[in-house]
Amino acid sequence: MTEHRIFTMSFSSVYPLYIKKAERKNRTKEEVDQIIHWLTGYEQAELDDQIQSENDFKTFFEQAPKLNPERKLITGVICGVRVETIEEPLMQEIRYLDKLIDELAKGKKMEKILRK
């Protein structure tokens, strides 16, 4: 079985796109970072190291300090697929992040995005 192309894409190449998407909707880089911290457990310095090292998505999620157990509460459609039904674990983690960034760009409050 071949890996999905996104697994080998560098997180640092997609990260600016997350920020750009958020900023187009008057949200901030800090809010994007807050979402990533919540989802992965990375502190800011660790996140900066991941970006600097240009790790791929697979490594980015493998090295995540502590994936938030509340991420299982993330539901909905991203790229035409329900995130809660994705069977490939890494793809599901990537789509969770995509979904949270989409919610940010759609103007949801951070409490809702972070499932509080």
Image (cartoon, rainbow, N blue to C red):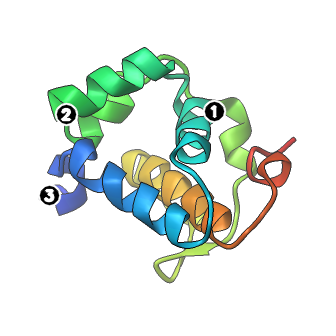
C-alpha span from label 2 to label 3 = 22 Å
Q: Earlier in the sequence, mark 1 or mark 2?
A: 1
Task: Check disc 1 and report its element: helix, strand or loop.
Answer: helix
Q: Which residue is mark 2?
A: 55
x and y percent of residue 58 in the render? Answer: 27, 39
Q: Earlier in the sequence, mark 2 or mark 3?
A: 3
Outermost residue to the bottom: 80
Q: Quarter of the image holding residue 82?
A: bottom right
Q: Is residue 51 above or below residue 115?
A: above
Q: Residue at x 77, y 64 (%)?
A: 108
Identify the amino acid type marked 1: Trp
Q: Which numbered dot is residue 1?
A: 3
Q: Which residue is mark 1?
A: 38
Task: Check disc 2 and report its element: helix, strand or loop.
Answer: loop
**Where's the N terminus, which quadrant?**
bottom left
- Nearer to the camera, 28 or 63: 28
- Nearer to the camera, 2 or 70: 70
